[in-house]
Amino acid sequence: MSFRASVLTLYPEMFPGPLGLSLAGRALERGDAAIETVQIRDFAEGKHRMVDDTPSGGGAGMVLRADVLARAIDHAAPAGDPRPRLLMSPRGRPLTQGFVRELSTGQGAVIVCGRFEGVDERVIEGRGLTEVSIGDYVLSGGELAALVLLDAVIRLLPGVMGNALSGETESFETGLLEHPHYTRPAEWEGRTIPAVLTSGDHGAVERWRRAEAERLTAARRPDLLDKA
Ligand code: SAH
């Protein structure tokens, strides 16, 4: 079973974009993951194919119409489609590694990319969209947020990462930030590699890495320790 994403967007040219390269690119080529785009404008009616309109109650910007978006969603994910329906949104549930892992074990996702001021609230309710945020800042559209989500999910799919173990010690997977890394040369600009890492003592290496992970997390992200 592969992971199938349907991305609803006004800018399908943005996909797969950077996900066409490297790790994700190979996963897409092999068919371990698939990204299909749906042009929201194809579901607009009338000569001008209007997808947005002015906000009720007044104010700046435009709002994506509920009727147009609902038709696009119903086309991409007819009733019975088991995939979660997500709306990229700064108001959403924060995208965490735990959430990413949960998505990576499923059959895929239907991802709506907002634009303008956002989307009509009624389509969020009417089509059961789960709002997902990639961080506390505002992007101009949901496409980059969807690419971030898909990158994080695709690298976790079975067989995608060269060394499956590297996923498990990474930042957030253990509730901690990851320990520092080093590689050859042994000395660079007068800086050496911590001796324990070249000692051959695997137990000592593990203890050092754990201690470094705890030290970094306490210094940079004490909120993660509070949660653990
Ligand atoms: N007026 C909205 C922001 C709209 S930004 C507000 O204040 O909440 C336009 C679109 O970009 C959004 O509909 C959403 O799809 C996307 N977007 C912006 N920031 C995002 C974020 N941090 N995470 C996920 N999607 C985001």
Image (tube, helix red, strand yellow):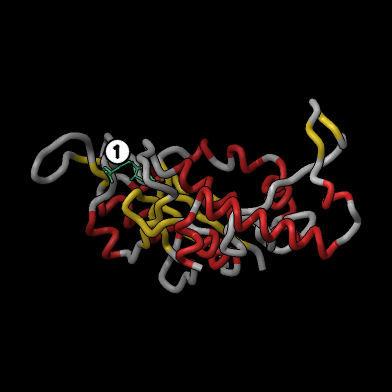
The reply, left or right, for residue 111 in relation to residue 33 is left
Quadrant hosting residue 192: top right
Tell which residue pokes out farthest to the right in this image: 200
Q: Residue at x 46, y 66 (%)?
A: 227
Q: 177 and 129: which one is in front?
A: 177
Label 1: few (<14), some (14–19) or many (≥20) C-alpha neighbours in 10 Å? some
Q: Residue at x 22, y 59 (%)?
A: 122
Can you say whether 34 is above or below 21 in the image? below
Q: Residue at x 26, y 64 (%)?
A: 125
Residue 155, percent from left and from top:
66, 54
Q: Disc 1 marks which amino acid?
A: Phe
Residue 189 showing in the rendered view: yes
Q: Residue at x 67, y 61 (%)?
A: 157
Label 1: which secondary element: loop
Can you say whether 65 is above or below 191 in the image? below
Quadrant hosting residue 115: top left
In the rendered image, the quadrant that contains the N terminus is bottom right
Residue at which label 1 appears: 116
Q: 151 and 64: which one is in front?
A: 151
Ligand 1: give its quadrant: top left
Q: 91 and 67: which one is in front?
A: 91
| Mark 1 beta carbon near ligand 1 (under 8 Å) | yes
Residue 56, percent from left and from top:
12, 45
The reply, left or right, for residue 61 in relation to residue 154 is left
Can you say whether 219 is above or below 99 in the image? above
Tell which residue pokes out farthest to the top in this image: 189
The total number of labels drawn is 1
Residue 214, percent from left and from top:
61, 58
Residue 104, percent from left and from top:
59, 64
Residue 154 showing in the rendered view: no
